[in-house]
Image (tube, rainbow, N blue to C red):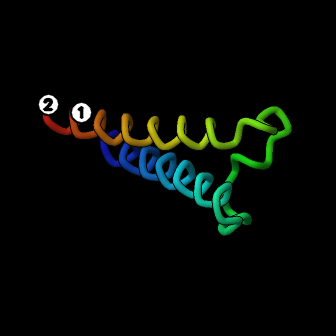
């Protein structure tokens, strides 16, 4: 379970940071998912921040699971 949480947290964090970099510089357009759904149009920066924070939270939770 710990490895799954670490992988999921890492992916969320990378997607969040990649979305922010894409919004600010235009790079990483092929592999970020935040700018693709129509429901997020106009809210890409907020969604990227939420993904990055969620990724950090999942990574911290994976550390807690591993300590038991």
- For the point 65% across and 65% down, which residue is it? 25
Residue at the bottom extreme, as displayed = 27
User: Residue 32, labelled with which disc?
Assistant: none
x then y, percent, for residue 5: 38, 41
Callout 1 secondary element: helix
Residue at the front extreme, as displayed = 24
Tell whether 37 sits left or right of 27: right
Instruction: Point out the image quarter for the N terminus.
Output: top left
- For the point 67% across and 69% down, which residue is it? 27
Q: On the image, numbered disc 2 is attached to which residue?
A: 68
Tell whether 20 sits left or right of 56: right
- For the point 23% across and 40% down, which residue is it? 63
Tally of marks = 2
- For the point 14% across and 30% down, which residue is it? 68
Q: On the image, numbered disc 1 is attached to which residue?
A: 65
Looking at the image, do the residues carrying marks 1 and 2 touch, with CB atoms under 8 Å apart? yes
* Cα gap from disc 1 to disc 2, whole angstroms: 6 Å
User: In which quarter of the view is residue 46 placed?
Assistant: top right
């Amino acid at each position: 379970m710990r490895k799954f949480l670490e992988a999921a947290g890492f992916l969320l964090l990378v997607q969040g940071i990649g979305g922010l970099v894409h919004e600010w510089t235009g790079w990483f357009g092929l592999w970020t998912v935040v700018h693709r759904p129509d429901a997020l149009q106009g809210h890409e920066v907020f969604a990227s921040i939420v993904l990055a924070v969620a990724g950090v939270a999942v990574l911290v939770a994976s550390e807690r699971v591993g300590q038991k």
